[in-house]
Image (cartoon, helix red, strand yellow):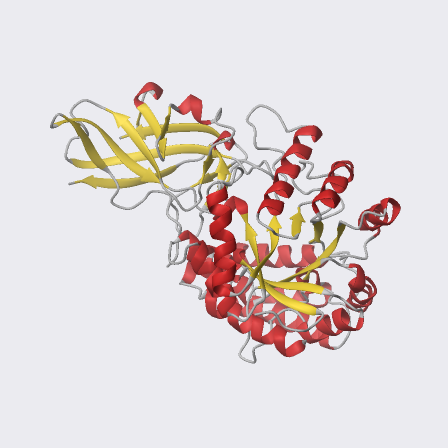
Amino acid sequence: MTEKKFFVPESLHNFYANGYPVGFQFQITLGGYRNKPLSCIEKFVVKVDDVEVPANMIHFCLGFKKYLPHEISDAYTDYWAAQDPATVEIDQLGGLPFGEHKIEVIMLAKSAYIGSPFYVTDVVNQPHTYNVSNMGKAEMMWVMS
Amino acid sequence: MEKNYDIKLAVSLYSYQDNYYFKRYDLEGCIAAAAGSGAEGFEVFADNMMPEWPYVSDEFADRFFGLQERYGIKAVCLDHFSDRAMWKNRQLTDDEMFERGVMYLKLAKKLGIPIVKLLHQEHIARVPISGYNLTTYEIIERMLPIAADMGLMMALEVHTADGVGADYQQKYIELAEKTGLHNVGLMADFSTFSYCMTTADIVDHCSRGAQREILEFLRSKQREAYFAGEPFEYESIREAVEKMSPNEATQSAINFAVRHGRGKPSFAQLYKELKEYASRMVYVHGKFYDIDENGQVDDMDYPKIFECLKEGGYKGYVASEFEGNRRMNMVGWVDEIEYVRKHQALMRSLL
């Protein structure tokens, strides 16, 4: 299989400050072949175990730059390379407890020249879902270890 | 390695997109693969394989020139996009589209690439299918003197079912003639000459649950019609297909194929026009999706297409543009390197 996965497998882990877990992070990819201006990403929401993470706790990271969700679509001149993962950091004192968690990302990433909104999903055989309702999501169950 | 033919061969690095995505090959690897296929030139997407786009450094440019020296292959075409929808709150204005267009021209000039494949308004149909205007005639008119000043050619890719002879494409040829600035021209894409559903599409549709038997039946009837020199009429097989009880995925595949063929001029006319326009075309995309056991592209008549290009006096590059990867990669790794190598061998045999 050469499926382009939205979530980078096994990328979920807690991160630490002074030896204490202060949050968790995971990686996602854009798929496709073209790099995308970040201004095309009009919505970025993360849910953990069906609970929406407050936007001020989310950092979308590309290279050395970090963006709050509402800042992503203002980054007109920054590009997300199709084959390079972005890191999503979530601030959470104590990190994500060990065990099974459901991580869901709802990302509206429209095409820069066609304009249609689409979601990158994790569904086999359906890497792009076009959805007229402007709602779509990618989700997957991960086990913290 | 440069050869002494009027028609030269190139590879669009788009053909290697999965190798690049999965990091089997970097830009250098893709250039090396293109050179290894025997091509004399390559085409590159800045938006894909140049992470510094749109502001490419001198260091990158130096390395880019160096790679061409190392592998004995020339960069011949840079791909432009019409990103009218790239901002969140509004569409780009024509002025902004013009400015972005010029950015591509400047990059091509900096990297010594002579042709910019430009995504023009009538790229895929008489009007853009998405509802967003692409790069319009008026914008191209403004870009033309700049391209002329830089010594670049803007190649407008005709990706439509009715080809380079369509009436609504002629204004661009007239623009070059009217201004005396021959820095804009049409380029054919072989997808115009697809006469049947490709085996790559069958793989793709079947991976979504379509019935192979029915799609192969459709394909065989389309081929029969083409080789008999007759137009394919879906109505002639509709009853037979319905008896085979097509499921939803199969019906959707059939609908797409039938819709694509609707209103298409006869192949006799398309070939006649290809020959007629060949000497004025500035670049060509050798599109292909799959290659059969005889080394032929499975849904296009390459011997006939090359005959038209040669007899019509085409002088320029034909670039391999493999798109079977996007159709077949759901069922396994598609060896893009080998596909392109076979495609180059086929085209070389037809020169």
Q: Position of residue B160 (x, y in %)?
A: 71, 54
Q: Taking B8 as reference, is A42 above or below it?
A: above
Seen at 66% across and 77% down, the residue is B350
Q: Nearer the viewer, residue B57 or B39?
A: B57
Snapshot quadrant of residue B110? top right
Snapshot quadrant of residue B323? bottom right
Q: Position of residue B76 (x, y in %)?
A: 61, 57
Q: Nearer the viewer, residue A55 or B15?
A: B15
Q: Quadrant of the N terminus of chain B?
A: bottom right
Q: Position of residue B49 (x, y in %)?
A: 48, 49
Q: Taking B19 as reference, is B142 above or below it?
A: above
Q: Position of residue B307 (x, y in %)?
A: 74, 74
Residue B23 shows in the view: yes
Q: Nearer the viewer, residue B278 or B182?
A: B182
Give the left or right position of residue B193, taking residue B43 as reference: right
Q: Taking B130 as reference, is B29 above or below it?
A: below
Q: Quadrant of the C terminus of chain B?
A: bottom right
Snapshot quadrant of residue B27? bottom left
Give the left or right position of residue B241, taking residue B66 as reference: right
Residue B121 shows in the view: no
Q: Nearer the viewer, residue B265 or A92?
A: A92
Q: Residue furthest left?
A: A19
Seen at 68% across and 56% down, the residue is B260
Give the left or right position of residue A78, taking residue B2 as reference: left
Number of marks: 0
Seen at 18% across and 22% down, the residue is A93
Seen at 44% across and 35% down, the residue is A136
Q: Residue furthest bottom?
A: B294
